Image (spheres, rainbow, N blue to C red):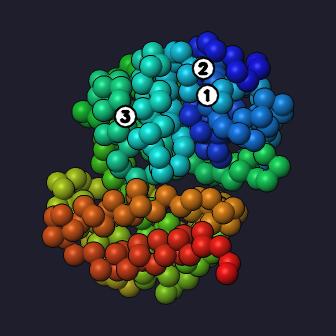
């Protein structure tokens, strides 16, 4: 379908054609669903010419409808936000005209649900999180490296027919997905682990298994998880072990025991996903903007407002923010 088409209607519209958006879109399209990908510039032109190419855990190509202007999209049964977090509010506002039944975001962090609810209504908004990974390569293909779980659920708790239907579509298409009755707790459980993982990936510039299995970086992660666990408790949010690492169990262990648990997780990553790299590391190496302020920065600011001590994560936040800023300064 040509770029510039002014009236696009889809079963699934995916905003953002990076790694995860492309993986989901390609699988849904291969399964026979009408999929529209909203992308910009060279990425949109590439998709129009060559479609979505997935390699790694799956190996196939799929053709999708491509839009490079949000005004082209008129309706979608389900709208999925898969962009990086910077500029999310502005992006969402350009889509308020779209007639949708349901919207959810697979972005990192926990601000996303409030932004979607403000734009589309809380009754149309689902919570979601993805323990699914990939990497957008320079040639436009996507390396699919991790396929554990995409979880969606009602923000009010419980599941629903729409959650079950969407989860069934995505899971049947080949990306593991299920409906969850406690999605807010699960989103926060991932966030508790993810904040430490993102900063360590940027600082070490290593594949995930390497910094998880290293004793010193594992100890740093344990301490950052403890700070994030205290923040969740202050907000009255229960966390669980259904995360990239078992954060609830870690809270009941000594630091030495928790480090052993993290290192075991690193060895598991080596076994099952040795090429896995956090998206922040991919962004650093590709020269893209880091989503540090909307994620780790959000946690630090929220902790400050609640008087929850977060010295280590605050220091790492400032370190990674400095790294991102210095990279953008042109050489003298």
Instruction: Find the distance from the CA under tag 2 to the CA under tag 1.
Output: 6 Å
The disc at residue 72 is: 2
Q: Which residue is mark 3?
A: 116
User: Which of the two discs, 3 and 1, sits closer to the camera?
Assistant: 1
The reply to whether discs 2 and 1 touch (Cβ–Cβ < 8 Å) is yes
Q: Crowdedness of circle 3 by 10 Å Cα count: few (<14), some, many (20+)?
A: many
Task: Judge whether 57 appears above or below 208 on screen.
Answer: above
The reply to whether discs 3 and 1 touch (Cβ–Cβ < 8 Å) is no
> Looking at the image, which is closer to me, 79 or 257?
79
Helix, strand or loop for disc 2: helix
Instruction: Find the distance from the CA under tag 3 to the CA under tag 1.
Output: 19 Å
Q: Crowdedness of circle 1 by 10 Å Cα count: few (<14), some, many (20+)?
A: some
Question: Quadrant location of the N terminus?
Answer: top right
Helix, strand or loop for disc 3: helix
User: Residue 300 at what x, y percent from top left?
Assistant: 30, 67
Is residue 249 visible to the viewer in this orientation of the structure? no
User: Residue 309 at what x, y percent from top left?
Assistant: 22, 75
Q: In screen coordinates, is 54 left or right of 231?
A: right
Instruction: Find the distance from the CA under tag 3 to the CA under tag 2.
Output: 20 Å
> Looking at the image, which is closer to me, 38 or 188?
38
Helix, strand or loop for disc 1: loop
Q: Which residue is mark 1?
A: 69
User: Residue 164 at what x, y percent from top left?
Assistant: 43, 24
Is residue 305 visible to the viewer in this orientation of the structure? yes
Residue at point 36%, 74% (across, down): 313
> Looking at the image, which is closer to me, 185 or 142?
142
């Amino acid at each position: 379908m040509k770029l510039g088409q002014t009236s696009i209607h889809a079963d699934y519209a995916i905003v953002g054609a990076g790694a995860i958006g492309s993986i989901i879109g390609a699988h849904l399209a291969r399964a026979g669903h009408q999929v529209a990908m909203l992308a910009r510039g060279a990425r949109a032109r590439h998709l129009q010419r060559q479609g979505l190419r997935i390699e790694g855990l799956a190996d196939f190509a799929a053709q999708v409808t491509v839009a490079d202007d949000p005004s082209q999209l008129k309706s979608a049964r389900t709208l999925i936000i898969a962009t990086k977090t910077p500029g999310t509010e502005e992006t969402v506002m350009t889509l308020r005209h779209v007639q949708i039944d349901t919207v959810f975001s697979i972005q990192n962090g926990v601000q996303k649900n409030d932004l979607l609810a403000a734009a589309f209504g809380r009754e149309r908004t689902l919570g979601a999180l993805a323990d699914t990974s990939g990497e957008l390569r320079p040639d436009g293909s996507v390396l699919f490296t991790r396929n554990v779980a995409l979880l969606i659920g009602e923000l009010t708790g419980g599941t629903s027919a729409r959650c079950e239907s969407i989860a069934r579509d995505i899971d049947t298409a080949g990306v593991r997905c299920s409906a969850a009755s406690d999605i807010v707790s699960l989103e926060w459980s991932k966030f508790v682990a993810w904040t430490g993982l993102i900063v360590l990936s940027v600082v070490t510039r290593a594949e995930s298994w390497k910094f998880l299995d290293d004793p010193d970086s594992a100890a740093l992660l344990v301490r950052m998880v403890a700070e994030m666990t205290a923040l969740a408790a202050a907000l009255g949010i229960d966390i669980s072990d259904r995360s990239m690492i078992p954060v609830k169990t870690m809270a009941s262990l000594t630091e030495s025991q928790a480090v052993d648990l993290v290192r075991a997780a690193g060895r598991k990553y080596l076994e099952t996903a040795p090429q896995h790299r956090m998206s922040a590391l991919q962004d650093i190496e590709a020269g893209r903007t880091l989503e540090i302020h909307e994620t780790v920065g959000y946690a630090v600011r929220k902790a400050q407002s609640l008087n929850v001590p977060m010295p280590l994560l605050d220091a790492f936040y400032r370190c990674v923010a400095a790294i991102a800023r210095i990279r953008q300064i042109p050489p003298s």
